[in-house]
Amino acid sequence: MENTYFVTITGLNHYYGKKPFEIGRIIRLIKEPDNEYDKEAIAAFLPFIDKIGYVANSTNTVYDGTISAGRLYDKIEDYAYGKVMFVTHSSAIVLVLDKEDVEEPDEDEDEVEEETVSVPVNDIKTEKKTKKPKNSKQPIGFRA
């Protein structure tokens, strides 16, 4: 993403409250084009918990300095990630992240570095090549 975007996550009291919104936690932002109330709805999810709120899309719920779901909707693909930066009494402020900064690359897509390992077999050494990714990222529990 070229620009830095912050969004307000609302509706916390309809789900699990503020508890899931730990500072620094990564959440997934998923478009809901079939949402009957808002065609630009973007839901916030955590693995193993499910939906925890929505990106604010009303002038009454979007905090100053953040953008609405409508403004973010065309800037992301089907989903994006966000990092919880602040938690207020009824909402959370989230920094929108690029998918590439969060997801682990597939081994097929990423360059791999070959490593040679010697393995003794009946007093004869054979060499076995194993592959390890050059740039592996820390997993956070999401599956693409």
Image (cartoon, helix red, strand yellow):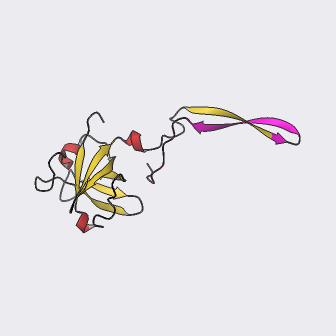
Q: Quadrant of residue 23?
A: bottom left
Q: Position of residue 93 (x, y in %)?
A: 24, 52
Which residue: 28% across, 56% down? 43
How many marks do you count on the picture?
Answer: 0
47 relative position to 87: left or right: right
**Residue 31 at least partly seen:** no
Q: Which quadrant is the N terminus positioned in?
A: top left
**Residue 70 at least partly seen:** yes
Q: Quadrant of residue 129?
A: top right
Relative height, residue 1 to residue 85 (above, below): above
Relative height, residue 98 to residue 37 (above, below): above
Which residue: 34% across, 62% down? 20
| Residue 129 drawn in magenta | yes
Q: Position of residue 37 (x, y in %)?
A: 18, 59
Relative height, residue 91 to residue 107 (above, below): below
Q: Position of residue 115 (x, y in %)?
A: 66, 34
Q: Is 36 or 48 nearer to us in this picture?
A: 48
Q: Position of residue 123 (x, y in %)?
A: 89, 40
63 relative position to 99: left or right: left
Q: Is 39 or 121 nearer to us in this picture?
A: 121
* Magenta stretch bounds: 120-144
Q: Residue furthest right?
A: 123
| Residue 69 drawn in magenta | no
110 relative position to 55: left or right: right
Which residue: 18% across, 55% down? 38
